[in-house]
Amino acid sequence: MRPLDWVVLVGSLTSIIAYGLYRGRGSNTVDRYLLAGKSMPWYAMALSIMATQASAITFISTTGQSYADGMRFVQFYFGLPLAMVVLSATAVPIFHRAKVYTAYEYLENRFDAKTRALASLIFLAQRGLSVGLTFYAPAIVLSVIFGWPDRLTTLIIGMTVVVYTVTGGIRTITWNDVQQMAIILLGLVVALIMVFVLLPRQVSFLDALHLAGSAGKLNAVTTHFDWNDRYNLWSGLIGGMFLALSYFGCDQSQVQRYLTGKSIAQSKLSLLFTAAAKIPMQFFILFIGAMVFVFYIFEPAPLVFQKAEYQRIRAPQLSARYDPIAARYRDAQTRRKDAAFALVAARHSRDARAEEESVARYRKAQQDVDAARRDAAHLVEATGGQKGFRDTNYIFLSFVTRYLPAGIVGLVIAVILAATMSSSSGEINSLATVSVVDLYKRHFRKQASDHHYLNASRVATAFWGAYAVAFAGFGNHLGSLIEAVNIVGSLFYGSLLGVFTLAFFFPSVSGTGAFLGMLAGEAAIFTTFLFTGISFLWYNVIGCVVVIATGLVISYLRPQTAASHPVRS
Amino acid sequence: MPSDTREMRDEPPPFLGTWRRAYAALVIYLALLITLCYLFTRAFS
């Protein structure tokens, strides 16, 4: 990093945090600290929802995913607008009218205390695992750039987040998110412009699209159906809808965002705006990854983007195994570059036959490049590297730090760090809210002053911050971070979605039916995860269906009596 | 923690008149996006 990068980085982060703290002043009651006094406008909630979801992982891992696997990951978001329509029509008015602090508080109104407690614990387990990964992503950034140890980096970022989250509560978090989204959009546009500026002069925008497309990187929609295929139109629409229903309807880190709305209409608008903006935004991020791929057709890309592992397999004692792979890779890269230039020339001269011939050569060379990279990854694994080694998390950052000019590097790093802080602060805040409202206040200290619960919320926030930093140490064992986060979420979300579906749409279901349904749902999801190859996007569907079916059967066999029915607020 | 006594209002959306129409517009927008993504894939594959 050069001095200008430091100025941009420190200036951006300082202004974001200072502005958030300024807007969050006066959070001196539990209601203001956890729900911003229900005063937020729709655009702030919408940007906060998007910013909480768009963590550093989004920029680091999604771009790398597109480089390696193409843009088909965008289909993951196709079900999101459908989910937002369902939630706007159901969950938003129900939660608002129930006047709850957490989604799980509503479950006690509808079912009973044990169902609320189980849902709260499932959320704490799931979100507690994910928040560590949120911290781990920027630690990769700084370890690549500065060589700092991951754990020290995580500790520094974690402490910063904890300080401002403990101080300002959700109002600070929300306004930080608004600022963060502005910087994210600026950073994305600048990064894409820079990729095009760095392409060879004779390669136009359309040429770049054809080069990416011919290598299978612009596969935004794949229509074939396959249970084991993670991303296709059907898994995106159906599985993605269920995941989005679970995430935005049952995950407190999102529910708490729209519970801060000043009216039901404002909360609904925030979800609809998020639904409209999310797919174009993800498309744009993936498109940057595809264009970075095109850039590396004309520039020598490292065989392995993870520096430490790359240096390790190049050691003299591994040369007998490394050298043949490296030679094949260099040869394939040269052939791919020549074929790409030939393809561009054929397109410009409108020579269809030459174009066809150069596309065939280009694709063959690309297959050889991919094969050499796979062999290098196997070599990393076979010589002591981590199992399932993938370098997708390092691709975009390697490009940024090596090729972007002074100032822009600082801006991109600011985007990644700001995204981390905002996402993790929202997650920590929601973990603290559930811990205090659903567990501490409900089961341990039922009657205390508002000041006591405010302090308890601050202590819980600090605790979850420390927990997240400690858990981040396991991040390097989880392959592609964006997939790891979604897989962890999918292990738990189906049950939560199932129990809320029972609560909203099946008035005859009892608390015991809902409780046992959740347990059965979790059992079904873990069985699917451990013993089948079914894609994780389907876990939510399976879990939800099992919870509903079990809840209905149990309630039919053991119908609730009037005495056992809880008092509803 | 005091109980919440605020009345939560559910006003119509600022566009299209009713929420039902707003939801329909979003679904149509989604169909349009998927179609555009499909055409994009076909055009450059």
Image (tube, rainbow, N blue to C red):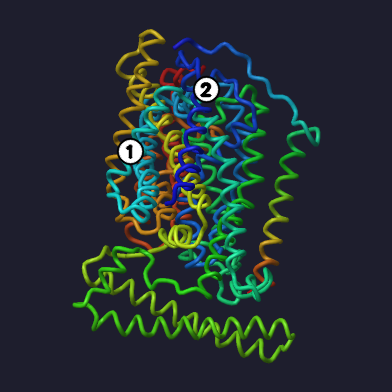
**x and y percentages locating residue A185 in the rendered image:** 60, 46
Q: Residues within 10 Å of mark 1 (few under 14, many from 20)?
A: few
Of residues A546 and A117, which is closer to you in this image? A117
Looking at the image, the residue that sits furthest to the front is A3
Question: From what the image shows, is residue A459 above or below residue A328?
Answer: above
Residue under label 1: A156
Q: Residues within 10 Å of mark 2 (few under 14, many from 20)?
A: some
Of residues A527 and A331, which is closer to you in this image? A331
Q: Chain of mark 2?
A: A
What is the number of callouts on the image?
2
**x and y percentages locating residue A245 in the rendered image:** 54, 43
Q: In the visual, does A106 lie left or right of A213?
A: left
Image point (58%, 24%), residue name: A96
- Dot 1 lies on which element? helix
Q: Chain of mark 1?
A: A
Residue under label 2: A22
Question: From what the image shows, is residue A44 above or below residue A36?
Answer: below
**CA gap, disc 2 to disc 1?**
22 Å
Q: Is any atom of residue A545 visible in this view? A: no
Q: Is there a contact, CB below 8 Å, between mark 2 and mark 1? A: no
- Dot 2 lies on which element? helix
Image point (38%, 85%), residue name: A328
| Residue A231: image tag | none
Looking at numbered disc 1 in the image, what kind of residue is underneath it? Ile
Q: Are marks 2 and 1 on the same chain?
A: yes
Q: In the visual, does A102 lie left or right of A78?
A: left
Q: In the visual, does A212 lie left or right of A136?
A: right
Image point (74%, 44%), residue name: B24
Question: From what the image shows, is residue A122 above or below residue A538?
Answer: above
Of residues A9 and A22, which is closer to you in this image? A9
Of residues A43 and A167, which is closer to you in this image? A167
**x and y percentages locating residue A348 in the rendered image:** 72, 82
